[in-house]
Amino acid sequence: MSDPSLLSDDALHALAEQVGDRLQASHLMLATAESCTGGWIAKMITDIPGCSAWFDCGMAAYSYEAKQALLGVRPETLVEHGAVSRETVTEMVSGALVNSGASIAVAVTGIAGPTGGNPDKPVGTVWIGWKRRGGYPKAELFHFDGDRDAVRRQTVAAALHGLMALAS
């Protein structure tokens, strides 16, 4: 996703529309659980007229406390693995389904920068999780380049691409 034109507002909007068409055709309702994107995925979705036919809710859970309260992430998971981990994103995406009427969910957690990174988890480290109700969660690690905006845009695009694949 190094081509900046693929990450423009127009491109992200077009991708969100494709996701919506796919979800609606598959009779799936979506929930989002977002940390580093702060609700950007839900914003792209809700910019689409008629999205209420396939979008249930979005939760922006930035703090440890919000991840626990809104998404059921266990305190032990956060202490042992940190907020930016496979374990956390898996619990986030599962919690989004438990705490919503959705049938499919996406969750993101990462370090968008410019601060917050370390040698083990540098800026641009992002975990994205996807899950369908009744299924097993899928989690993928990404290392995105660029400034805070670029990392977040790439995260939104990757999350939407993953939803396209899962909703097929």
Image (cartoon, rainbow, N blue to C red):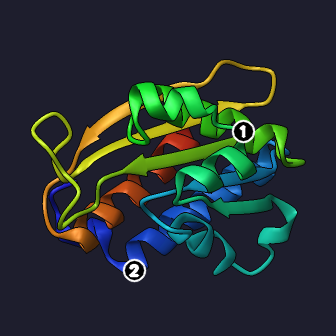
Q: Is residue 5 above or below residue 99?
A: below
Left or right relative to 60: residue 158:
left
Above or below, 76 relative to 54: above
Give the secondary structure at mark 1: loop
Checking the image for residue 9, the label placed there is: 2
Q: Could you tell whether 7 is left or right of 130 in the image? A: left
> Which residue sits at x=20%, y=51%?
144
The kind of residue tagged 1 is: Gly
Residue underneath mark 1: 72
Q: Position of residue 157 (x, y in %)?
A: 40, 57
Residue closest to the far right = 101
Q: CA distance from mark 2 to mark 1?
A: 32 Å
Between disc 2 and disc 1, the foreground one is: 1
Q: Is residue 57 visible in this depiction of the protein? A: yes
For the residue pair 9 and 97, the one nearer the viewer reads as 97
- Label 2 Cα crowd, 10 Å radius (few <14 / some 14-19 / many 20+): few
Residue at 59% x, 58% y: name it: 61
Mark 2 element type:
helix
Q: Quadrant of residue 149?
A: bottom left
Image quarter where the C terminus lies is top right
Q: Residue furthest left?
A: 119
- Mark toward the start of the polypeptide (2 vs 1): 2
Where residue 91 appears, x then y in whole percent? Answer: 62, 32
Q: Nearer the viewer, residue 67 or 40?
A: 67
Q: Amino acid at mark 2?
A: Asp
Say which mark, if any, is on residue 56: none
Q: Could you say where residue 19 lies in the image, as x and y percent from the top left?
A: 61, 55
Callout 2 touching callout 1 (CB < 8 Å): no
Few, some or many C-alpha atoms within 10 Å of disc 1 (few <14, some 14-19, many ≥20)?
some
Judged left or right of residue 91, residue 117 is left
Q: Which residue is more in the foreground, 106 or 84?
A: 84
